[in-house]
Amino acid sequence: MIFTFLNILEGLEFDIYYELMMLCVLVLLGIILGKLAEKINIPAVTGYIVAGILVGPVFHLVTEEITDGLKIISNIAIGFIAYSIGMELWIPKYKNSAKEILIVTFVQAIMTTLVVFLALVIFKQSLAVALLLSSIACATAPAPLMMIIKRYNASGKLTDTILPVVGLDDGVGIIIFGVSLAVAKALINNNGEAINIGKIILTPLKELGLSIALGIVVGLLVGFVSNKIIKNFAKHDKNDTYLSLAIVCVFLSVTAAHYFNLSPILVPMVIGMTVTNMIDKETFKTQTKVIDKFTPPLMIAFFTLAGAELDFKILLNAGLIGIVYILARIIGKYCGAYLGCLLGGSDKIVRNNLGITLLPQGGVAIGMVITVANECGETGKMIQTIVLAGIFIYELFGPVFAKMALERTGDIVRQKKGDKNPPTPDEPIPPLNQPEDNKNVA
Amino acid sequence: MLTKFSLETQILLSLAIILAVSFLITRITKLLKLPNVTAYIIAGVLIGPAVLKIVPSNIVDNMGFISDIALAFIAFGVGKFFKRDVLKKTGVKVIVITIFEAVMAFILVTLSMHYIFKVDKNNNWSFSLLIGAIATATAPASTMMTIKQYHARGHFVDTLLQVVALDDVVCLFIFSVASIFASDAADKKIEAIQIILPIVYNLAVIVLGFVLGFVLNKLLGPSRSKDNRLIIIVAMLLGLSGLCGILEISPLLGCMVFGATYINVSYDKELYHQLDNFTPPIMTLFFCLSGMKLDLSSLKTAGLIGIGYFIIRIIGKYLGAWLGSLTVKESKDVQKYLGLALIPQAGVSIGLAFLSERLLPPELGATLVTIILSSSVLYELIGPACAKFAIFRTSNIDKNYNLLKPNLETNVNLADGGQNIPNGEATPISNDEEKNETNNNTN
């Protein structure tokens, strides 16, 4: 009966309202599966993604049209995640570990690229394909990591390393990908044109530089306004204004990134980072609290939609090369992170576990592969299949491994049975007895 | 100005601009002691297609769903005021007052349109009847927002909110009756189903809202984390407003019943507070967009009849509310000021105006739409200010509220639900509502 009802609805032109209802279904199912996932000790994120897969590619309740229509939500969500990561990057906190983090980020990115490149060349892929795939391989998705860290209130050395590494990784990724794309295009077209090395390196550097510059300029402005003006507002007014400000920042940076071809992650992240280093602790607390109270529905919509966009069939099409790519990236990330930590002098506990947490991959890689598909014709299509298959696997299992690693290092304290909401420094209220209290008051 | 960008860029940029400009204008209205809603609406008029044309009209048209979502949130939030004991205390009185104020506005506007402005030709009452029926509609959103902004509480606010909520039902009823008469008189027949269906749908959604209230109570068991509670309620409200959008009815009634049922089965005020942290940007967008939709050019063409309608409706609402509350022996405050808070008119009335246009001869139909559109501009601009005046006069506002400075956010012992507020603070906290507020902001 439901199906006939939905069929009737599809015939009518109430697109946006239909989308709203589907979003409701997606999110509620996401909540349910997220809970179920946590029962078997898998992060809720995976449950959300599975809910998306069920509603999307399995039962076709949500079609591609709908996910396209709701794409704007995903873009906004990525912006918010990047902004929150930036907000965590308070420079004094990383004063001692800055060198270590830079080394780790670079080494793991380069290692991943190298390992994937070699593996693909061994399996007789052309240089161009190997180059493109290996450069996409180093992209990581900050969203699931951020989600897990926030959800389980992870804290510790590993957590302190992950956040800046995933953040910076995007910057390194831009350069590696930009250079590879230019070289690969020259290889594919191969019309004897001399490769202009200066231009190849300059284009991604420009993207990186502009992203950072824009982020800093906007960040300075926002920080100034927060400090000088909003701080003096009355409480409620202040909270609302901070929220508006953060939303305006994220929206503007997402649009600017799309319009000028800048990184949709770096721009909001640098804004957040600049702001967080300008404001005092109290303001920081208010701002993160206000944002944290606003974003949860956006986040779950983001992950369920990401799941709805995944496609099974692509797994079959990817074939052997797909498996090689997926395994090589895992090895590359793990060894890269291990080596990086060794060189940077990180703790043993971080060294052994960091690579596992860097596996999730999503939005950034999709953005890259779309560029490739647009610019490299047939080769691009094939690369797209493989990368999407990889994302399917990484997105589904990455968070599981990341959580395991965080549990192993003790960053996430395993919960006892029956204590589902462990009290945390930020939120000391056990919501357990909250309704009861209200009842008594009423 | 933005049209050269892609659609998605346009939307995001427009939203960013709306939020930024709205904020700037609230700084001005703060100085003038006007409610924020007025600022949002003025911001909408300024940057919308009417004046500066910064936000293109295709964006405004595409954003209609934001109004539905915002209305759903507002209505659900208002449901919190409909606790059983409050309803018991005021129930019958409210029904009488609502019928009085609606019928009075209807009669006054209809008669004056017929006899003073003589718009109807050949002794055909259609136009007067329809515009009279439309006059009964009030737009509760801006009044509700103003109440929220000033954290007004008390008997007057309770009565006002219930009247406003019920008004929607009475208006739909009067309009249905009027349109039956009008379509008998006019040559054009409107199918009965077009009038009955919305009523049936509304009833269905009310029932659904009632059921959802219980479902929500089951879903939000004590073990739910705060984030999940927020996600669930947002998703359910999105779904409900999506359904209402598909059925082409206002989400107001359904969501209000939803909210009222939930508070009565769960006594869980915390959820409404969580929503208060989530909704401000949506509200800003909503009122700013309604400002953009206001058609300033219709002001010029509305003419004398428009001004007549504008004034007579206010008189009708005020007299009706006064008479009604006098009849049921309501307090002086309610008698004097209730009518003022019933002035705002938009959304529903505009929808009904377009529906009546189809019932009338083309020329009259156009006049009616112009009158309603232009008066809604004025009503929306002065409505929130009048509502604020009425609320302030009935002294339900905690005057200290806006003086609450961050230094008052001291460490409240959170384990006891925030009941032990440290002494020595000039905490203007008068009821449990406010305690939760402090509680929220310290954790």
Image: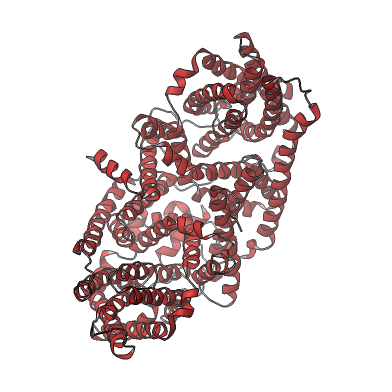
Residue B395 appearing in the image: yes
Q: Is residue A327 left or right of residue A130?
A: left
Question: Residue B289: image x %, image y %?
Answer: 49, 63
Task: Identify the residue shown where x is 28% and y is 58%.
Answer: B261
User: Of all residues shown, which one is farthest toward the bottom?
Assistant: B116
Q: How is the image coloured?
A: secondary structure
Dividing the picture into quadrants, the one containing residue A267 is top right
Seen from the viewer's position, the closer of residues A189 and B428 is: A189
Question: Residue B186: image x %, image y %?
Answer: 23, 74
Task: Identify the residue shown where x is 55% and y is 64%.
Answer: A237
Q: Quarter of the image containing the C terminus of chain A?
A: bottom left
Please determine whether, in this image, residue A212 is positioned above or below residue B412: above
Seen from the viewer's position, the closer of residues B280 and B286 is: B286
Please determine whether, in this image, residue A334 is positioned above or below residue B8: above
Dividing the picture into quadrants, the one containing residue A244 is bottom right
Seen from the viewer's position, the closer of residues A5 and A277 is: A5
Residue A415 appearing in the image: no
Question: Residue A331: image x %, image y %?
Answer: 59, 16
Q: Is residue A439 left or right of residue A91?
A: left
Seen from the viewer's position, the closer of residues A264 and A353 is: A264
Q: Is residue A342 left or right of residue A407?
A: right
